[in-house]
Image (tube, rainbow, N blue to C red):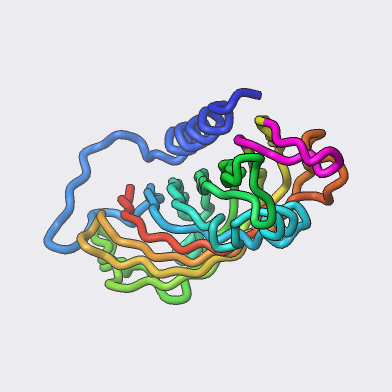
Amino acid sequence: MTRSTPWRVAAAVLVAGMLAAAPPARAQRSGDGFLFHAPTGSFVLRLGVEQPSASSDVFGFVTDELTLRKADFRGLSIGGELNAQLGSRTALVFGAGWSGSSRDSEYQHYVDNNDLPIEQTTSFERVPLTVGLRYYLTSPGVAVGHLAWVPSRYAPYVGGGVGAMWYQFRQTGDFIDLGTMNVFPDTYKTSDWALTAHLNAGVDIALSPRVFLTAQGRYTWARAPLGPDFYGFDRIDLSGLGFTLGVGYRM
């Protein structure tokens, strides 16, 4: 599997979802603060930060031996969602995203023969593809007769879902053979897919009949096997907490 494959899969999922959920083309206009029909769904782009739990032993090893902390695996996240309305307060949510970090480090207790740091770079990436349900705690909008739909200013929600997550954990630089104490350059890399589940909560804030801001907190659970470069370690922990801000468009 190439490095770009998960991105292609994520893009394909979002495009397919958009085509499936898009309403038939027809003349539709917004009135003064309302739509002439209830939305059939929405599309959201998100930007935020993810803090992996980093609780498995491979993370324990690198934070014990190298100048890395769990907080160093915190990184940027980007993502997109397609929401298809199932009812006045419920929606089916298709999502895809990416989060990652890259940090330079060195061995805490060893230097090379020239008393120089033994340096390396560690990167960690995750690409979730999910489907889930969302429930609005208050009505996201109100129908006025048969010809108008007025969005609520604030629409808090909770939700959850399941899916698959691709990950890659990679270290490149100089390392120590603890048997011989020789220093050598190398790259260690592992990647795989895992099942994932998540819970989230957030709020949509209407800016216009079609455009809204959205803020969300989400916790994800996942673990995956490690490749032969990390033989002897338990499954890697892919869980973590994320916070995002985004902009959405009602369809």
Please say whether residue 160 is visible from this viewpoint. no
Q: Is residue 8 left or right of residue 24?
A: right
Residue 215 quadrant: bottom left
Asked if the magenta segment contains residue 198, the reply would be: no
- Relative placement, left or right, of 163 versus 209 is right
Q: Position of residue 42 (x, y in %)?
A: 38, 50
Outermost residue, bottom direction? 138
The stretch in magenta equals: 172-184
In this view of the protein, which residue sits in the foreground, 56 or 129? 56
Numbered marks: total:
0
Residue 180 in sight from this viewpoint: yes
Residue drawn 27% across the image and 72% down it = 153
The image position of residue 242, as x and y in percent, is 51, 61
> Is 118 or 166 nearer to us in this picture?
118
Residue for point 26% across, 36% down:
26
Outermost residue toward the top in this view:
2
- Residue 150 location in percent, x, y? 25, 66
The image quarter in which residue 121 lies? top right
Q: Is residue 89 above or below residue 225?
A: below
Q: Which residue sits at x=30%, y=67%?
A: 205
Q: Position of residue 124 (x, y in %)?
A: 59, 45
Determine if the magenta segment contains residue 173: yes
Mainly helix, strand or loop, the magenta region? strand
Q: Residue at x 58, y 43 (%)?
A: 119
